[in-house]
Image (cartoon, grey):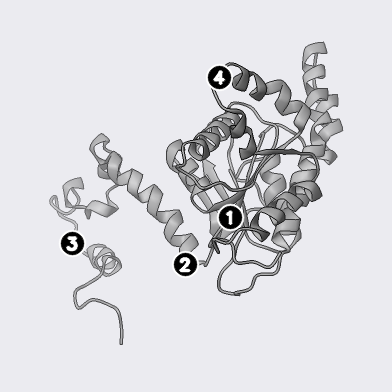
């Protein structure tokens, strides 16, 4: 039995409305179907509707595709791939710029590890061909995000990119599965989707954006708004320098027990072992995979 309604659906009326006679009434913006009127949808009053649309669109697409859980990769948009590292240094002008370029080029090893970790995660056998778990997910941009999607692509597996409109990024990285390449206007809803299905996080060196994501993630776990999952900080020396977690404990701002929420790792294999150990001993059934 068909699940179509007995009245015209929205697509039917979009088609029918395109055939109306051109008159002063029909060519006026007020005559447009509300959901086909961009000027109306972009009004300040419609912000709640736009919020809902950005929440619904990726959710519906990923549910229909059988994406049950994700492995989220956070990290810099500036760290070069190993093949681009030397060119970055050579292109830098001036001593200060040259030193910064060398610092970034020295971190290209994290691009390698992110790509490798994403490939390992993407190669795990899936018990149900209609449902996928630990699908690699990134913020859709270059650098570490690209490495994550690239690793999944190396394995011939799908991956997700949750991009955001920025003046200095013109396109998502080319390794995202096209069907799962999303673009957001609202940072809050983008971050919601990054966390919504996450069953593991790999956090690589990064700047303001990465720190924003890191602290929200740790806050959610700390306040029991999110159940604990594997949280991997890549690069102990980097993170110890950037965030003094021990000082927060000493000052009484967090407890020593809060430091168990995450682990420092350096290689893809080390990080994957943490993920496997966590989910192998978890009895919730949230990731029904044989590790």
Closer to the eye: label 2 or 1: 1
SS at badge 1: strand
C-alpha distance separating marks 2 and 4: 46 Å
Task: Tell me which label, 4 or 1, sits earlier in the chain.
Answer: 1
Quadrant hosting residue 260: top right
Task: Tell me which label, 3 or 1, sits earlier in the chain.
Answer: 3
**Residue in view at x 60 percent, y 21 percent:** 248
Residue 87 vs residue 223, the one in the foreground: 223
Give yes or no for contact between labels 3 and 4 (Cβ–Cβ under 8 Å): no
Closer to the eye: label 4 or 1: 4
Alpha-carbon neighbours of circle 1 within 10 Å: few (<14), some, or many (≥20)?
many
Task: Tell me which label, 3 or 4, sits earlier in the chain.
Answer: 3
- From the image, tell me which residue sits under label 3: 21
Give yes or no for contact between labels 3 and 2 (Cβ–Cβ under 8 Å): no
Give yes or no for contact between labels 2 and 4 (Cβ–Cβ under 8 Å): no
Task: Tell me which label, 2 or 4, sits earlier in the chain.
Answer: 2
Closer to the eye: label 2 or 4: 4
- From the image, tell me which residue sits under label 2: 64
Q: Position of residue 7 (x, y in %)?
A: 19, 74
Res. 252 mark: 4
């Amino acid at each position: 039995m068909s699940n179509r309604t007995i009245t015209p659906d929205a697509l039917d009326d979009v088609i029918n409305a395109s055939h109306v006679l051109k008159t002063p009434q029909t060519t006026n913006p007020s005559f447009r179907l509300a959901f086909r009127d961009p000027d109306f949808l972009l009004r300040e009053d419609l912000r709640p509707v736009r919020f809902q649309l950005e929440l619904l669109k990726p959710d519906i697409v990923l549910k229909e595709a059988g994406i049950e859980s994700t492995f989220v990769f956070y990290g810099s948009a500036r760290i070069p791939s190993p093949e681009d590292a030397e060119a970055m240094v050579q292109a830098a002008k001036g001593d200060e710029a040259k030193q910064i370029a060398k610092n970034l080029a020295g971190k290209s090893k994290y691009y390698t590890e992110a790509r490798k970790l994403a490939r390992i995660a993407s190669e795990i056998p899936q018990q149900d061909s209609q449902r996928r778990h630990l699908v690699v997910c990134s913020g859709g941009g270059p650098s570490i995000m690209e490495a994550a999607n690239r690793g999944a692509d190396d394995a011939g597996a799908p991956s997700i990119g949750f991009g955001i409109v920025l003046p200095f990024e013109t396109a998502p990285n080319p390794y995202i599965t096209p069907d799962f390449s999303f673009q957001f206007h609202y940072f809050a809803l983008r971050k919601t989707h990054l966390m919504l299905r996450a069953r593991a996080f790999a956090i690589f060196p990064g700047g303001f954006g990465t720190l924003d994501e890191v602290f929200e993630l740790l806050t959610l776990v700390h306040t029991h708004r999110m159940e604990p999952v594997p949280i991997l900080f890549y690069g102990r020396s980097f993170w110890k320098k950037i965030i003094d977690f021990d000082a927060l404990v000493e000052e009484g701002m967090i407890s020593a027990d809060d430091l168990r929420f995450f682990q420092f790792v350096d290689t893809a294999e080390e990080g994957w072992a943490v993920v496997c150990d966590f989910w192998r001993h978890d009895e919730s059934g949230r990731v029904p995979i044989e590790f």
